[in-house]
Image: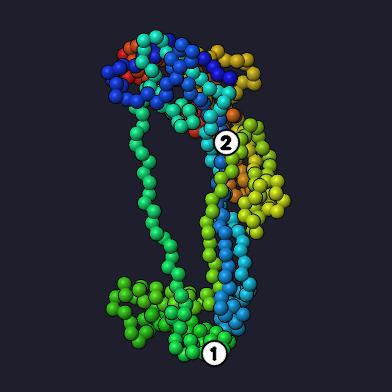
Amino acid sequence: MKKLIILTGIVLSTSAYAQTEVTAGVTRGKDYGVTYALPKTEIEIEVKANKVTYTPGEFSKYADRYLRLTNVSADPKEYWELVSVKAKSVGVPDSEQTYFVKMKDKTVAPLMELTEDGIVKSINMPVSTAKPTTKQPTDQTKRKVNPRDFLTEEILMTNSTAKMAELVAKEVYNIRESKNALVRGQADNMPKDGEQLKIMLQNLDEQDNAMTEMFSGTLDKEAKTFNIRITPNQEMDNEVAFRFSKKLGIVANNDLAGEPIYISLKNLKTLNVPLEEGKKKIEGIAYNVPGKARVTLKEGTTTLFSDELPVTQFGTREFLAPELFNKKSTVKIQFNPITGGLVKVDREGE
């Protein structure tokens, strides 16, 4: 249902804004003006998880015997691990709160800036042209080290897997003794300065880790981000937001293969919203006065997220009087496109 707003007094200076693009202009029958929407709130849950792939080491069955590494599996496997769960408010157009601003004949169109979804962002303010800065992608791929590059000729010439594992383990212990000697300043060939010491220790660490992984195996983690939307039309108490499975990752809230992640949403009643006054008289520019809710996400008894978020459905709606828009001055208005609330109102000229 669309509401008709007639602003008889909005007049913009054609000289002041001659070069400024009108963000949106439409006609409704013979009327000329702008259609805009107010947002309603959806709670967006951002879930970060890792898909982990375990590859057993070449000497995994000798891990306990030679390096005292316990619980090392000789079988490859894949599983998921939950990293973080967060929530935020996002604004989406409310089809029940769509408005049309009609202009008087022979006046220029109102300078209104809307989002791509048609939600009002500002009135009588220059259209933002700055493009968001994008970070240049950086290659953070870690170089895969081949542990066999560090093996001696004696080790490589060994035909017995058990003997090779024993010799590699001895090499690991020798590397660790060398690191300890460097740190204590007891090495035969001490580095000349701190930078050289740092480089030597890094190289020894690289060799130690690579050869140890021949016993312990490797874990490759692939980071994934999932976004889940929930529309809070009323309070919620421990309702299933989604489910998480160590085998499958994020699954639907009705998929019993995963453990439930519960969401609770409590109206904080920061505003005294009248129960029912009948329909307000539609006159002026409509805007939201959002309420607040405490949003909590839990896995069992463990709280994963808890914070206060704005929720327009728990607030009210108000109107800016048409008298603000007269020929003697220009009123500049900025809205929050997520909540539809007022950010600031300025007046220029008298």
Residue that sits furthest to the front in the current view: 29
Residue 288 vertical position relative to residue 306 in the rendered view, above or below: above
Q: Amino acid at mark 1?
A: Asn
Tag 1 residue? 159
Q: Which quarter of the figure has residue 106?
A: top left
- Residue type beneath disc 2: Glu
- Dot 2: element: strand
Q: What's the residue at 31%, 72% (across, down)?
A: 195
Quarter of the rendering occupied by the C terminus:
top left
Q: Residue at x 55, y 84 (%)?
A: 165
Where does label 2 land, which residue?
Answer: 42
The residue sitting at 47% across, 90% down in the picture is 154
* Residue 112 vertical position relative to residue 184 in the rendered view, above or below: above
- Taking depth in this image into account, of 66 and 96 the one nearest to the observer is 96
Earlier residue among tags 2 and 1? 2
Mark 1, secondary structure of its residue: loop
Is 335 situated left or right of 14 in this image? Answer: right
The image shows residue 253 at horizontal and vertical percentages of 67, 46
Whether residue 92 sits left or right of residue 178 in the image: it is right
